[in-house]
Image: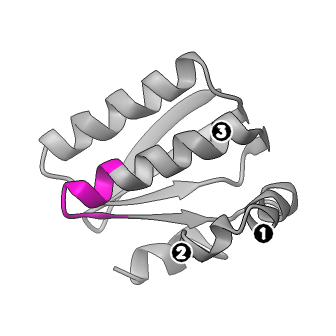
Amino acid sequence: MKLLHREENSVVIIEPKGKIMGGPESIELHDLLHELIDAGKKNMVVDLSKVDWMNSSGLGILISGLTTVRRAGGELRLAQVTDKIQSLLTITKLITVFKAYDTVEDAIKSF
């Protein structure tokens, strides 16, 4: 997984690309979130449009990210969730935990 990020209207957009399967990428995302929180950034959107696949470890990474951001007084939203990941979120009932939006712009407007 490659992990890029940018900021728009005081919201950080995190753009993972590839597969989210756990392992080193969980540490990479964890470190990025803490770095952003330490810099005073609290509202974040994870753009999942370029994620090919995610397993249960990947879902765990997202849950951990949500918890980390909420503990810091912020929010984490999902955007452009692919059909495969939407199915995973629905089956695991995590669709009720995350706020998901069709576009990054809609997610940014939700703050």
Percent coordinates x, y for residue 110 in the rendering: 41, 83
Judged from the image, the secondary structure of the residue bearing numbered disc 2 is: loop
Instruction: From the viewer's perspective, tell me whether residue 105 is left or right of residue 1.
Output: left
SS at circle 1: helix
Pointer 3 with pointer 2, Cβ within 8 A: no
Q: Which residue is situated farthest in the front direction here?
A: 92
> Real-space Cα distance between discs 2 and 1?
12 Å
Q: Is residue 29 magenta?
A: no
Q: Quadrant of residue 90?
A: bottom right
Name the residue tied to disc 1: 90
Question: Helix, strand, or loop for circle 3?
Answer: helix
Q: Mark 3 is on which residue type?
A: Gly
Of the numbered discs 1 and 3, the one sitting upstream in the chain is 3
Mark 1 → mark 3, Cα distance in angstroms: 15 Å
Instruction: Decide: few, some or many residues near mark 1? Use Cα within 10 Å; few <14, some 14-19, many ≥20.
Output: few
Q: Which residue is mark 3?
A: 58
Q: Which residue is labeled 2 in the image?
A: 99
Relative placement, left or right, of 5 versus 80 is left
For marks 2 and 1 on the same chain, the one whose residue lies earlier in the sequence: 1
Q: Residue at x 45, y 33 (%)?
A: 29
Instruction: Find residue 103 and report its image quarter.
Output: bottom right
Q: Quadrant of the C terminus?
A: bottom left
Q: Is residue 70 magenta?
A: yes
Residue shown at 49% from the left, 36% from the top: 4
Magenta stretch: give its range.
Answer: 68-75
- Viewer-nearest of discs 2 and 1: 1
What's the distance in space between the residues labelled 3 and 2, CA to CA?
17 Å
Q: Is residue 67 above or below residue 107?
A: above
- Amino acid type at circle 2 is Lys
Q: Are marks 1 and 3 in contact (CB under 8 Å)?
A: no
- Image quadrant for the N terminus? top right
